[in-house]
């Protein structure tokens, strides 16, 4: 399940749906400011996460139970992952390919996309 940024209003129904769907999902991840919506569900409480760099301060103030890490492309905790801005989402997507299909397939996928992964690695 992917929670994207700019998802409109964060209604109680949307938050409940994400929380319930996450129970059944094999992988739950956010990209960019989607971390705000994912954090609002409580799923990130006590974990380390990241978001778009322009929103670090706002995220820290709004979600004190989530340990924000500034700088990594993405952060993983088992089936939960958060990515920074848009290109960080590409790196997380390649990590998903690696997770399910291995290093070689992830490398080939990056090659076909003409994408050079960053030297900055995930944390946690």
Image (cartoon, rainbow, N blue to C red):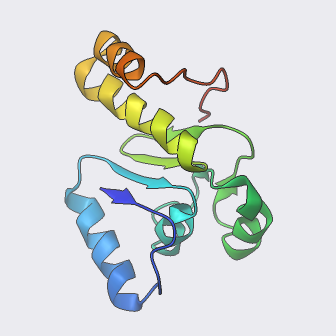
Extreme left residue here? 24
Residue 60 location (% of width, % of height): 74, 65
Extreme top residue here? 104
Compared with 82, 40 (above or below) is below
Left or right placement of residue 14 versus residue 5 in this view: left
Q: Nearer the viewer, residue 41 or 33?
A: 33
In which quarter of the view is residue 119 placed? top right
Q: Quadrant of the C terminus?
A: top right
Residue 55 location (% of width, % of height): 72, 64
Q: Nearer the viewer, residue 99 or 32?
A: 32
**How many numbered marks, from 0 up?**
0
In which quarter of the view is residue 18 placed? bottom left
Residue under the point 45% across and 22% down: 114
Residue under the point 33% across and 21% down: 109
Left or right placement of residue 65 versus residue 81 in this view: right
Residue 64 location (% of width, % of height): 71, 68
Extreme right residue here? 57
Residue under the point 26% across and 71% down: 20
Residue under the point 76% across and 72% down: 61
Compared with 55, 30 (above or below) is above
Q: Quadrant of the N terminus?
A: bottom left
């Amino acid at each position: 399940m992917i929670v994207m940024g700019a998802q409109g209003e964060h209604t109680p129904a949307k938050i409940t749906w994400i929380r319930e769907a996450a129970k059944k999902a094999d992988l739950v991840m956010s990209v960019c400011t989607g971390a705000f919506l994912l954090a609002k569900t409580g799923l990130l409480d006590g974990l380390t996460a990241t978001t778009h760099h322009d929103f670090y301060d706002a995220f820290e103030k709004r979600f004190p139970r989530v340990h924000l890490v500034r700088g990594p492309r993405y952060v993983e905790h088992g089936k939960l992952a958060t990515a920074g801005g848009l290109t960080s989402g590409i790196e997380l997507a390649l990590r998903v390919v690696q997770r399910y299909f291995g290093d070689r397939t992830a490398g080939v996928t990056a090659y076909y996309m003409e994408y050079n992964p960053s030297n900055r690695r995930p944390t946690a």
